[in-house]
Image (cartoon, rainbow, N blue to C red):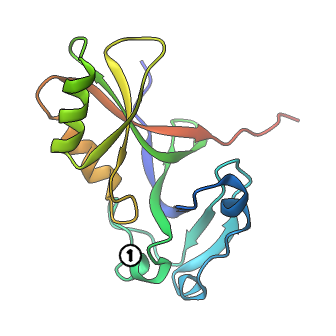
C-alpha cells in the first residue's frame, strides 16, 4: 500500500485566485514575497509560483508574514512529495469520500458547516465529492484536511492535486 504524501518543508505553492486561466498565467508575484525565497513560475494550466524557501517550514505552517506578503490574490498551498520524491501540486480543492451516499442537500449542509463550497460530485462514485474553501486566500489546507478527515461520516479526505511529470531519459 502506498504511503500518504508528505509535505515538502522547503517549498510552497502560491496559486493566483484569478477567475480565468489567462489572467492566472500572466499574474505577477508581489515583490515582498522575494524576502521568503526564490520564486519559480509553475508550468501549469492553473498557473502559480513555486517558492523555494530560504528557511524550511516547521511542519506545514507557512512562514510568518508570507500570507500578508502574498496578499489576498494568492492561495498558499503545500507541495506534496510521494515516496519517490516526486512532487504533486494541490489545486486548492479537497476530495472527500463519505461512508455512504449523500444527497445534494446533505453535501451542501456538510460544506456549509466547514466553511466550504461544494464544487461537484465525483462522476465515478456517489459517495465522493469535491469541495473548495469559501475563503481560499486564508485557508490552511493541511489543518482543514485534518479536521475533515476526522468528521463523522467521512471515510477519507485528501487534497486534489496535479502532478509534475518528468520524462525519462
Return the x and y of residue 33 as percentages of the image width and height: 54, 82
Residue sitting farthest toward the front = 105
Which residue lies at the image location 20% right of the left edge and 43% below the top edge?
112
Is residue 42 shown left or right of residue 150?
Answer: right
Is residue 152 shown left or right of residue 120?
Answer: left
Residue sitting farthest toward the right = 169
Which residue lies at the image location 46% right of the left edge and 63% below the top edge?
75
| Most foreground residue, 24 or 83 | 24
The quarter of the displayed image where residue 108 is located: top left
What SS does tag 1 mark?
A: loop
Residue 45 appears anywhere in the view: yes
The quarter of the displayed image where residue 130 is located: top left
Which residue lies at the image location 73% right of the left edge and 67% below the top edge?
26
Return the x and y of residue 129 as percentages of the image width and height: 37, 26
| Most foreground residue, 108 or 48 | 108
Q: Measured along the vertical axis of the image, is residue 43 above or below residue 26?
A: above
Q: Measured along the vertical axis of the image, is residue 155 above or below residue 124?
A: below
Q: Measured along the vertical axis of the image, is residue 94 above or below residue 139?
A: above
Residue sitting farthest toward the left = 152
Is residue 59 shown left or right of residue 27?
Answer: left
Residue 149 appears anywhere in the view: no
The quarter of the displayed image where residue 1 is located: top left
Q: Residues within 10 Å of mark 1 (few under 14, many from 20)?
A: some
Return the x and y of residue 88 as percentages of the image width and height: 56, 43
Query: Residue at label 1?
Result: 63
Q: Which quadrant, please, contains the C terminus?
A: top right
Which residue lies at the image location 67% right of the left edge and 70% below the top edge?
27
Is residue 79 shown left or right of residue 158?
Answer: right
Return the x and y of residue 51 as percentages of the image width and height: 58, 68
Amino acid at each position: 500500500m502506498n504511503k500518504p504524501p508528505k509535505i515538502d518543508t522547503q517549498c510552497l505553492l502560491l496559486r493566483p485566485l484569478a477567475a480565468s486561466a489567462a489572467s492566472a498565467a500572466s499574474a505577477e508575484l508581489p515583490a515582498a514575497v522575494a524576502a521568503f525565497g526564490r520564486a519559480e513560475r509553475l508550468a501549469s494550466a492553473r498557473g502559480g509560483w513555486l517558492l523555494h524557501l530560504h528557511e524550511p517550514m516547521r511542519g506545514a505552517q507557512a512562514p510568518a508574514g508570507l500570507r500578508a506578503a502574498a496578499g489576498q490574490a494568492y492561495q498558499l498551498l503545500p507541495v506534496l512529495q510521494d515516496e519517490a520524491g516526486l512532487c504533486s501540486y494541490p489545486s486548492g480543492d479537497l476530495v472527500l469520500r463519505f461512508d455512504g451516499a449523500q444527497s445534494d442537500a446533505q453535501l451542501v449542509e456538510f460544506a456549509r458547516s466547514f466553511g466550504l463550497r461544494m464544487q461537484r460530485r465525483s462522476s465515478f462514485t456517489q459517495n465522493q465529492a469535491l469541495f473548495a474553501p469559501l475563503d481560499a486566500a486564508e485557508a490552511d489546507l493541511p489543518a482543514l484536511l485534518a479536521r475533515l478527515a476526522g468528521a463523522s461520516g467521512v471515510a477519507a479526505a485528501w487534497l486534489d492535486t496535479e502532478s509534475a511529470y518528468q520524462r525519462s531519459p
